Image (cartoon, helix red, strand yellow):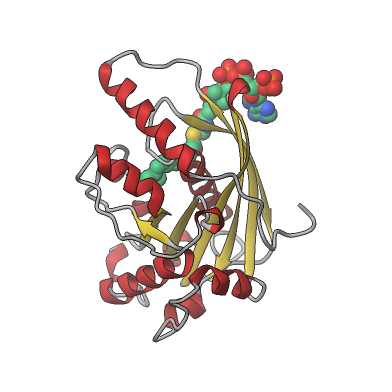
């Protein structure tokens, strides 16, 4: 079946207005598909998720990259305090092609979204010599109904650079209400609203991960430049303590 014709798949217009709401709510910017970030690697999640997937990073990170790589566009998030901005968010529409044995969304697809979101928070510039997943622990809390809008909100909570380690976490929550809301209404303090609303969001799954920086570094100029950008960009992501993280973790 042509994935694009799946019944109920959001139209591009509905999808893009959903993404704009997420940007405003979490103080992030979508990584443009045509940008350096997006074109560096095969966009495997987009294919798996029928193109209804968005990758969002803090605007401070994208701003930094835009200075060195002007093809990345920026949309400022204005007054949002950087410390409250998640390291990365992946938004996705999960349709029938991702059905698992439970009748809901396949656990592997869920793990993939969570993994990629923590990977982006850890490693905001797609870099083949950067941090890779060494361990991923996923807790599946509820079946994700097919045809849901979901967001994975990822944070880095600890870095041990000397040991090449970085620890992160992500929560996969229902974003259906946000997708359906006609107007946002919290433009003044979007992050406050996000924090408050998080207590009401339906939690589908959460994950913790250890990312380890690969030993081998390329010595060509390109790799050197990209690791400088990475170093700069990651400085911009502050290590945050997560609000409303499940007590069990
Ligand atoms: C997506 C579209 C994007 C669109 C554009 C938007 C922008 C996006 C920007 C960016 C997105 C990025 C998104 C990526 C997300 C996905 C990432 C993946 O799925 S990666 C593939 C799966 N992972 C592998 O294939 C790793 C395979 N494993 C390895 O390569 C090695 O095992 C490695 C590097 C993990 C470790 O090997 P060693 O030999 O280099 O390091 P040693 O010395 O063994 O370990 C270093 C420390 O880490 C601990 N460690 C290593 N592995 C561990 C483990 N499994 N569990 C616990 N600790 C472990 C060790 O105990 C050690 O710690 P002590 O120094 O002793 O404290």
Q: Is residue 201 visible?
A: no
Residue in front for this viewpoint, 231 or 151:
231
**Relative to 191, does residue 44 appear above or below in the rendering?**
above
Q: Position of residue 186 (x, y in %)?
A: 47, 79
Q: Is residue 68 visible?
A: yes
Q: Position of residue 152 (x, y in %)?
A: 53, 58
Answer left or right for 17 relative to 210: left
Q: Position of residue 109 (x, y in %)?
A: 51, 53
Residue in front for this viewpoint, 161 or 35:
161
The image quadrant that residue 162 belongs to is top right
Q: Residue at x 50, y 31 (%)?
A: 131
Farthest top residue in view = 219
Q: Quadrant of ligand 1?
A: top right
Q: Residue at x 40, y 73 (%)?
A: 21
Q: Residue at x 20, y 44 (%)?
A: 70
Number of numbered discs visible in the structure rendering:
0
Farthest front residue in view = 79
Q: Residue at x 39, y 46 (%)?
A: 61
Residue in front for this viewpoint, 190 or 7:
190
- Name the quadrant of the N terminus: bottom left
**Relative to 31, does residue 96 appear above or below in the rendering?**
below
**Relative to 55, does residue 239 appear above or below in the rendering?**
above
Answer left or right for 223 relative to 209: left
């Amino acid at each position: 079946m042509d994935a694009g014709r799946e019944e109920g798949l959001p139209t591009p217009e509905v999808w893009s207005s959903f993404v704009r709401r997420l940007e405003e709510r979490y103080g992030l910017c979508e990584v443009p598909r045509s940008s350096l970030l997006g074109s560096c690697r095969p966009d495997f999640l987009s294919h798996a998720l029928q193109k209804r997937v968005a990758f969002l990073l803090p605007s401070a990170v994208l701003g930094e990259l835009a200075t060195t790589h002007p093809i990345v566009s920026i949309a400022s998030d204005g007054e949002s305090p950087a410390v409250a901005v998640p390291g990365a968010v992946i938004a996705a529409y999960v349709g029938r092609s991702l059905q698992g044995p439970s009748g809901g969304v396949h656990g592997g697809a869920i793990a993939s979204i969570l993994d990629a979101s923590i990977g982006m928070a850890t490693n905001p510039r797609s870099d083949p010599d950067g941090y890779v997943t060494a361990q991923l622990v996923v807790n599946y809390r509820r079946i994700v109904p097919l045809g849901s809008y979901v967001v994975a909100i990822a944070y880095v909570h600890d870095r041990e650079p000397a040991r090449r380690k970085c620890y992160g976490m992500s929560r996969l929550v229902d974003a259906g209400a946000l997708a359906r809301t006609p107007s946002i209404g919290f433009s003044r303090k979007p992050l406050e609203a996000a924090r408050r609303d998080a207590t009401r969001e339906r939690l589908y799954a959460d994950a913790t991960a250890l990312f380890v920086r690969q030993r081998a570094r390329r010595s060509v100029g390109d790799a050197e430049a990209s690791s400088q950008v990475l170093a700069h960009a990651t400085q911009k992501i502050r290590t945050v303590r997560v609000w409303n993280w499940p007590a069990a973790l």
